[in-house]
Amino acid sequence: MELRIGHVVKSHGIKGEVVVEVTTDEPEVRFAVGEVLTGRQGRKEHELTIDTARVHQGRLLIKFKEVPDRTAADSLRGTKFIAAPLIDEDDDGFYDHELEGLRVLHDGTDIGVVTGVMHVPGRQILEVELDGGDNSGKEALIPFVHDIVPEVDLDAGCVVITPPDGLLEL
């Protein structure tokens, strides 16, 4: 399993730095000096070693050992960085890929499947494609908070929801 941990937005300056939009919870681990990143750009894949990394205006600026100047940095625009998930046995959170595809149960009834996870400031929202009845094929957005999603059972392949009245009404 591979996760997207960030992508190159553009070059920065003349010394070969790039602006990276980070999409990982642990940028200090993933983008540490000396780390070797796997980057994909279309069908091309390359490995890049982080020489320096610093925060600038809310984004990460990275200089790679293999990128000597702005021209080389410009050629990396759009490169997506991927990595294997970090395993932390003490972490009780979930990766998006673990939630996607889980069946959604409400009052013991299977009502749909998680198709995605939205990340908005301060919380996550499960995107659920409903099936059955008048709501078949429609999408519901369910806040991923313990009061509404009290149980996630990865082994059973499901999440149990207790939505407030009206949340599933479309």
Image (cartoon, rainbow, N blue to C red):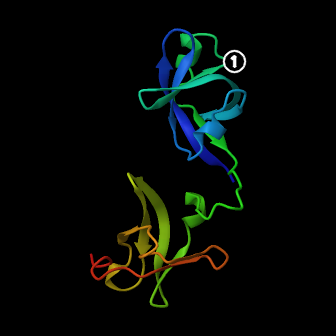
Between 115 and 155, the one nearer to me in the picture: 155
Element at label 1: loop
Instruction: Check the picture and name the quadrant holding the C terminus.
Output: bottom left
Decide if residue 134 is on the left or right side of residue 67: left
The residue drawn where x is 27% and y is 80% is 166
Direction front: furthest residue? 90
User: Which quadrant does the N terminus fall into?
Assistant: bottom right
Q: Is residue 33 left or right of residue 112?
A: right
Q: In which quarter of the image is residue 42?
A: top right
Assess disc 1: are there few (<14), some (14-19) or many (≥20) residues with their C-alpha within 10 Å of its C-alpha: some
In the rendered image, residue 97, in percent from the top left (x then y), is placed at 59, 59
Q: Position of residue 67 (x, y in %)?
A: 64, 16
Q: Name the residue under label 1.
A: 65
Give the residue drawn at x 57%, y 77%: 158
List x then y, in percent, for residue 83. 67, 43
Vertical relation: 58 (above or below) 145: above
Q: In this view, does 145 lie above or below 23?
A: below
Q: Which residue is drawn at 61% across and 65% down?
A: 92
- Amino acid carrying label 1: it is Lys
Q: Residue at the location (48% across, 65% down)?
A: 115
Q: Up-down: is 42 above or below 125?
A: above
Quadrant of residue 125 within the rendered picture:
bottom left
Image spot of residue 11 (x, y percent) = 50, 19
Residue 96 in which image quadrant:
bottom right
